[in-house]
Image (cartoon, coloured by chain):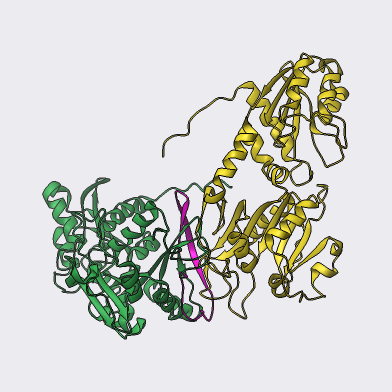
Chain colours: A green, B yellow
Amino acid sequence: MPPPIAYKETPDQHWMHLALDQAQQGVGLTSPNPPVGAVIVAQEKVIGRGYHHRAGEPHAEVEAIRDAQKTHPKLLRGATIYVTLEPCSTHGRTGPCTEAIKAAGIKRVVFGAYDPNPSHREQSRNILLLAGIEVTAGVLEEECRAIIRPFSKWITTGIPYVIAKAGQSLDGRITRPAGESSLITNDAARAHGRRLRMRVDAIIVGAETVRKDNPQLTLRDGSAGSGKVQPWRVVMTRSGDLPQHAHLFTDEFKDRTVIMNDKSLPDALAILGKHGVVSVLIEGGGIILGQAFREKVVDEVYWYIAPRLCGGGRPSIAGPALPDSIELKDVELRTMGDNVCFHGFPVWPETGAQVELLQRAVSI
Amino acid sequence: MPPPIAYKETPDQHWMHLALDQAQQGVGLTSPNPPVGAVIVAQEKVIGRGYHHRAGEPHAEVEAIRDAQKTHPKLLRGATIYVTLEPCSTHGRTGPCTEAIKAAGIKRVVFGAYDPNPSHREQSRNILLLAGIEVTAGVLEEECRAIIRPFSKWITTGIPYVIAKAGQSLDGRITRPAGESSLITNDAARAHGRRLRMRVDAIIVGAETVRKDNPQLTLRDGSAGSGKVQPWRVVMTRSGDLPQHAHLFTDEFKDRTVIMNDKSLPDALAILGKHGVVSVLIEGGGIILGQAFREKVVDEVYWYIAPRLCGGGRPSIAGPALPDSIELKDVELRTMGDNVCFHGFPVWPETGAQVELLQRAVSI
């Protein structure tokens, strides 16, 4: 293997990484807003930091300004703010961040990603420049765009961002022979898969999964104190034949369970999108995953594989054959003991041109 | 992760590792004999080395003695020989190694694995001790046994050692939708899979694979100058309906193609074992792999997975469902670009007791 390429961050990139760390803390919590982080820097040190905690609460810029006012009030005037997303210039549930930045006496704004909403993009730049504030855009743009990928899709299309997940045997089966344990992947893989629920607003399963596995689809590990609410639990059914005693209809989160009766997956996603669901996790089974890939609605994939051969049982992708196979790009492989997780992004040739146009629109 | 445990080799282990390096050079070339390597050490340096090249040619011990006689004739008397397998004491196509060791004036014999043939085991020890030669057994025994695993199975059961290989999509399919390339795994994975052919005496495929894929099953990369002969190419067919123009029946190795007509896989393996085939590689397709796992004849597995979803097409394990799922143990995961290879050994609960008895018989 060649040695890794050594490269040195610029100071702007260094501070923006810290802003990204802030943004990361809001992932999964801010819908229908994007997760955003900010740090304020003066005299080469961080004097304030903050992130957007949840919709209706202050934006990251205001959180960081308030932090600096409390801890370093004398250094705030003339400071630089690093924010992962272009500051807003419009009145939402909170005032425009451009005004808060001006009022704080900040002299330079560095942001990562442009606002993916075409009607907002670059609005703030002119407002800030007219106020005599220096603006630098596009620092760590790729990373800053990646963290708001779900929001960008939803705000531009109305359709939630879709993560598909499966846990299967080496030979692609999600059930074991009768009489064996129902578990296929190991503890580490299953815990990793459950943590994906922290990132989304809704979890989709097929009726067959409810009938056969009776899942809870709750957050469990690591959600305590995070402020994360239980994601919607959406059951896709054609027959409406669902067991009334299932966890989803009887547990403490039964008000967070929604039944989509005789709806196609694209229709169900459009309905969820209209209700402010920015991201969903499809947890299976094979029939619903088959639909998701045939309908080309999947944006991101986590596929867990255990070293066991089942040679029969339900396949991880069921139903009619796919018309074309689907390649994953930007694949990351993670070993979890003797299990492997493939993480990647489906390549959708037909919509490739659209995606490119969208990316260009966001970059320009 | 805990830090790796630091451990220091003993001198005997150090020299035995060099003998294993020698043995490795004979893997796949020596059937029906096992691969064996030897080094001779005097004054803390290697004065001779050798390995068994092929059946009918000198054993590793004799190769190493001849090497020492040529290069360090004065140091041979009183030297120590390290050999991966217990030296033979019987007349085969060559004379007994115990006699060659005595004649060379060697004063100490260190070996790794005991002879897996129960009627030969520990014969040499007494012969050598009576000649005043010191004997140390079981140095790096596990590694030395691993390298002769195929031979050990064949010599004790008459059945060849079976390696099963598959190359599949993430969702367990070995064919892509009509109109697409027939390739699923990447170049590195396919090259790695082809190199497995260097280790075996025969390659088994199903008739469907011949009809659909028309494989060559030749050695290609890295076989030139190795002395490796083209492994037998064994086609399993029930109908006898095979394309006469296929590579297997027309290319330069057509005399190395065998048709097993209406034979079960266990029967076919028994026939091959009787003809001195010590190891086979089952390359698929799904029907023959399904038979192999249902019949519990597989000893080792290489499973290559590419980040592509096919959602239909032929499964990697086809035919009737397995009665029990099969766990792999001692799993090694190897990433090859964005492909993964799972390497492991099937756990066969029913025959576990037998295997243990066999291992005990070999160790005692």
Q: Position of residue B165 (x, y in %)?
A: 63, 58
Residue B94 appears in the rendering: yes
* Number of marks in picture: 0
Q: Residue at x 25, y 81 (%)?
A: A274
Q: Is A36 a magenta residue?
A: no
Q: Is A334 a magenta residue?
A: yes
Residue B238 drawn above or below residue A136: below
Q: Position of residue A254 (x, y in %)?
A: 18, 70
Side (left or right) of B314 relative to A198: right
Question: Which residue is more in the foreground, B291 or A206?
Answer: B291
Dividing the picture into quadrants, the one containing residue B106 is top right
Side (left or right) of A121 relative to B102: left
Dividing the picture into quadrants, the one containing residue B355 is top right
Dividing the picture into quadrants, the one containing residue A149 is bottom left
Q: Position of residue A189 (x, y in %)?
A: 39, 55
Residue B208 drawn above or below residue A75: below
Side (left or right) of A13 relative to B4: left
Start-end of magenta stretch: A315-343
Side (left or right) of B89 relative to B174: right
Q: Residue at x 72, y 72 (%)?
A: B238
Q: Which quadrant, please, contains the C terminus of chain A?
A: bottom left
Q: Position of residue A208 (x, y in %)?
A: 35, 74
Question: Which residue is more in the foreground, A55 or A227?
Answer: A227
Residue A283 drawn above or below residue B100: below
Residue A152 appears in the rendering: no
